[in-house]
Each structure stands twice: as structure tokens, then as C-alpha cells.
Image (cartoon, rainbow, N blue to C red):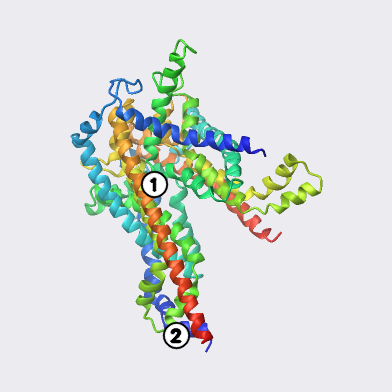
Amino acid sequence: MDIAKRVEKNGFLRFLKRDWGKRSVIGIPYVFLIVFFSLPFLVVLKLSVSEADGIHYEDLASYVDGIVNIKIKLSNYIFLSSDPLYVETYWSSVKFATINTVICLIIGYPFAYFMARSAPGIRPALLMLVSLPFWTSYLLRVYAWKGLLDDHGVFNNILMWAHLIDEPIKMMHTGFSMTIGMVYTYVPFMILPLYATLVKMDLRLLEAAKDLGATPWKAFWLVTVPLSKNGIVAGSMLVFIPSVGEYVIPELLGGPSTLMIGRVLWDEFFSNNDWAMASSVAVTMVGLILIPLVIFNKYQADSGGAKGV
Amino acid sequence: MDSKLGKSWLLAGYVFLYLPIVTLIVFSFNDSKMVTLWGGFTFKWYGVIAHDTEVVDGFILSMKVALMTATASVVLGMLAAFAMVRYKSFFGRTTFAAHINAPLVVPEVITGLSLLLFFVMCEKLFGMPERGIFTIWAGHTSIGMAYAAVVIQSRLLEMDKSLEEAAMDLGCKPFQVFYLVTLPLIVQSIMSAWLLTFTISLDDVVSTAFLSGPGSTTLPIVILSRARLGLNPTVNAIATITVAVVAVGVLATSMWLSRQERMRAAEQSAAYREGMQVVEA
């Protein structure tokens, strides 16, 4: 008998394929995510176009004297796109996320490269050392930089003690401190996918390039870098997307000049109690993240077709 | 590339990654009011946090939420992973995949805000739920199950399906196949998914801030509110304990897992050898 048919007749797969089994395997997580992820976002979408007064908001549709009134209020969005503070915040979020991504790539690429080219015996240990900080609290690791960069922090104390400076250098609550915090937090997200692609690379290709007269530098740029493109794209996405919406780092290490959209949403909600405005900010923020995601998916679809080469 | 540059780059990278953690630990033993000025060795901050009810209560709540989150995330994530790997076509599969991946990329401020507004709406309509451990759990689990699904999915994809088929041929009942064959084969990924979601939940501050009520403050919320005000030696002491627990936990688990893996490999090859002997005889 055909194995597949026997399997079909015999057991586990049939259990999974039996309707109620299949339905619950798919249905339970599906329902959970719809209830606790999608529906809440629809609430946000609705609230962002509702007539609201602080935390009280009206229904979108009302039925009075046989007439259905649907009110969609776009003033929040108009305000968001015309108010210079918000426009500037969006720009500044994208700017800091981009700077962060570029620095992570500059630091992370050589790091992943040297890791992948180190002796195979020590690679697991090197990899473990990169991922270990992941397991310790991210909040505490960001807080740690406060102690290093503060006016009376470790760095300033050392420099003063060595008489290299007389007055503490202002590092905290600037773009500098925030960028350091972001790079520190996100550089492992860049290193890990890059390492994964670089370690799989066929080193004979470099030998071939050398045989054909390429200098090591040229071979690196013309062979290694193009072959690690997938890692570069994946790493950049993993760094860029979460850093656009970052809240904790700008809150603890940033200052008044480092506007970030995540922090504005938070303040809009917790300080101003303007739930409708916070919702509108959230909706536009999703838009901001969708753009790189769509590009990423398109890129993956394209490169998927070219994988055979 | 010359290896000297390589070594120094790696060294500098690791110093960058570990320097902040090391200073956190060192200054938790600092007997001085100035957090960053060394004033002698002390354990006093550990005594202070042991008697700090805010910290202790926060820690207990965090542990409860993390246990609930990790367990629920692993169960839901495993179902989701099975659905994705075993069913190549069902109604709404693309949306299902998008639902599983979305929590990984949506910023937490949005997850937190939207869930809170949703719960507020539910409270208006049904009079429940109140903000507290349940609402925090729901938020953490919707993020955690996405991570768990990714981890378990990758293991299921590389799993050798013929083992399940063999068990079925030998007359295993469906649940037996799951318990005796599938589960042991993916238990590693389940363990790592559980640990990952546990630490994600234990560490989460942004969505928790939206979802916690007045009486339900988790440890990260306590830490954030103190860290906002400036440097605080009690935070350093908390950090040191966390790092110690995590280091021991991760090392112990990875050692246990690699031993399990080696044992299974040995058993498999022994079984294979026996089988070959039988065939030869």
C-alpha cells in the first residue's frame, strides 16, 4: 500500500485532518489573535475618527428619527499632518531609526564577518556571547547607560580623574546618548542574521575571485557583500522597524531635542489624556512601519525567485 | 582580512556589549550615596530591596504574569505552528500568517494602547475585565505566542516526518504519536520558546504600563519609574540579581538541552545499528 495512503488511514495526520481537530488547531490561536490583537486595533481606528472629549467618545453611527448619521472626524489627521511638531517628530523618528540602522550595520557587519571567519570550534561560544545580553532585561541595560553617560557618570568621572577634562561633558539627554542606547540595544539584531548568511557562504568563491586576479578588498566588495545581501536586508529591517516606535530609550536616554513618535503617543495618552489623538498617532505610526515592510516583502519575493542562481 | 583587526573588532564589540552590564553589577555593591562614585564595598542595597514592598510585590506579580504568559504562549504558539506547517491550505491562511507575524513588528506602544482601549470598551459594554493581571497577561501573550510560534515552527519544518509515519505504521494512536514521537522531537524548541516568552514577559514594560491597573504594578514598571528620576542603587541591585538568575538559568538550560540532544542522537544511532544487525542476520 502507498505509504501516504496508510498514513492517511492510520493515525495522527488523520486526527489532525479530522475536521474538529483541524478546526481547533487553527481556530484557537486564530480566535485569540483576532480578539486580542486585531479587534483592539479596529477600536483604535474607530476612536481616531470619533468625536471625542478626553476619554469620552461618541459612536460613529447614530440613528435618530429614521436617519442613520455617520460621523467621521478627520480633524485629528489634518492636525497631525499640519502641526509642525508632529511632522517634525515623524521626521526625527525616521532620522534616528535610519542613523541607528546605519551605525548598527557599520559595527555589526565586520563583527558578524569576523565571527563567521573565526575558528569553527569557538563560534558557538561567540554566538552565545552575542545573544546572552538578550536574556537580561532590556530596560536595565538601557538604564545602565545612564550610569555611564551621566554628568556624574562613570565616563565623566574617569576623564575628570585623569585630568583630561575639567568640567563634565554633557552626554546625557542628547542625540548622542540616545543613539548609543539604540545602537547598543539593536546591534545584536543586526549581527545575528548577518552571521547566519556569512557563515553559510562558500569560501571557494573567494578563492575563485583571487585566482581571477581580484584583490582581497575587491573580492570582499564584489563577492562577499553581494552574497550577504539577504542578511543585510533582514538585519536592517529588524533594527529599523522597532527603533521607529521606540519608547523606553528616548524616555531614559533622550532629551527634549530627541523627538520620537512612540514617546509622543505615550505623552498624548498618559499626560494629555487625549485618547483620540493618541489613536490617530498610532494609526499613522502603523503606516510608517508598513512602508519598509512592504518593500521588504517585495524584496524577499524577488530574491526568492533568483535563489537558484 | 587580517586576523589582528578581526580579533580587536570582536573584542571591542564584546566590551561594548558587556561594559554596561558589568558596571551595573559593580555599582550595586557600592557603599556611597553617589551611585557612580566608588565608596567601598557593601551588600546593603540588597537588604534594602528585600524589605522594599514595592519591589517585592512587583517581583511576585511579574513572576505570576510571566509563568502564565509563557505557558499560554507556548500552547497557542504550538497550535499556530502546527497550523502553519501541517495545513498548506485553509480558508484565511494568509491572514492567519499575517496575524502570527504582526505582533512581532508592531511597536508595543500600539499593542498596549489598542488593547487598553479595547478593554475599556469591553468594560463599558460588559462591566469587565478590570485592569490587572488578566489584561497584562492578554497583552503579553499576544506578543509571546508570536515568538513561540516562530521558534516552534522552525523546528517543525526541519523535523523528520517519517518518524511520525513509522509510529503510525506500528499502530500508535494519534495522541500516542503526539506524546511519544512528536513532542519529544520538538521539546527543545518548546523549552526555548517557553524561556524566551518568560523573559519577554518578565521584561516587558511598555504594554504593561498601558494594561496594568492601580493595584497591579510589575517589577519593570517599578524600575522604569525609578530610572526616570535618575540613578538609583536599588535598581542596580535588582539588575544584578536578574543577571545572576538569567545567566544561571540560560547556562543550565542550554547544558541540559545539549545533553538531551546528544542522548537522543546516541539512542537513535544505537537503534539504527540494532536494526541493521537484525537485517544482516
Residue most extreme to the right: A213
Q: Which residue is mark 1?
A: B111
Q: Residues within 10 Å of mark 2 (few under 14, many from 20)?
A: some
Q: Which quadrant of the view contains residue B232? A: top left
In the rendered image, is residue B236 in sight? yes
Q: Which quadrant of the view contains residue A172? A: top left
Q: Amino acid at mark 2?
A: Lys
Q: Is residue A189 above or below residue B77?
A: above
Give the structural element (helix, strand or loop) at label 1.
helix
In the rendered image, is residue A63 in sight? no
Is residue B273 or residue B206 the one in the foreground? B273
Q: Is residue A212 left or right of residue A248?
A: right
- Quarter containing the C terminus of chain A: bottom right
Residue B4 position within the rendered picture, expressed as x and y whole percent measured from the top left: 62, 35
Q: Which quadrant of the view contains residue B53? A: top left
Label 1 chain ID: B
Residue A48 position within the rendered picture, expressed as x and y whole percent measured from the top left: 40, 43
Give the structural element (helix, strand or loop) at label 2.
helix
Q: Which residue is mark 2?
A: A9
Q: Residue at x 51, y 70 (%)?
A: B88
Q: Is residue B280 left or right of residue A299?
A: left
Q: Residue at x 46, y 38 (%)?
A: A185
Residue most extreme to the top: A166
Q: Is residue B46 left or right of residue A306?
A: left
Residue A303 position within the rendered picture, expressed as x and y whole percent measured from the top left: 65, 55
Q: Amino acid at mark 1?
A: Thr
Q: Residue at x 61, y 49 (%)?
A: A198
Q: Residues within 10 Å of mark 1 (few under 14, many from 20)?
A: many
In front: mark 1 or mark 2? 2
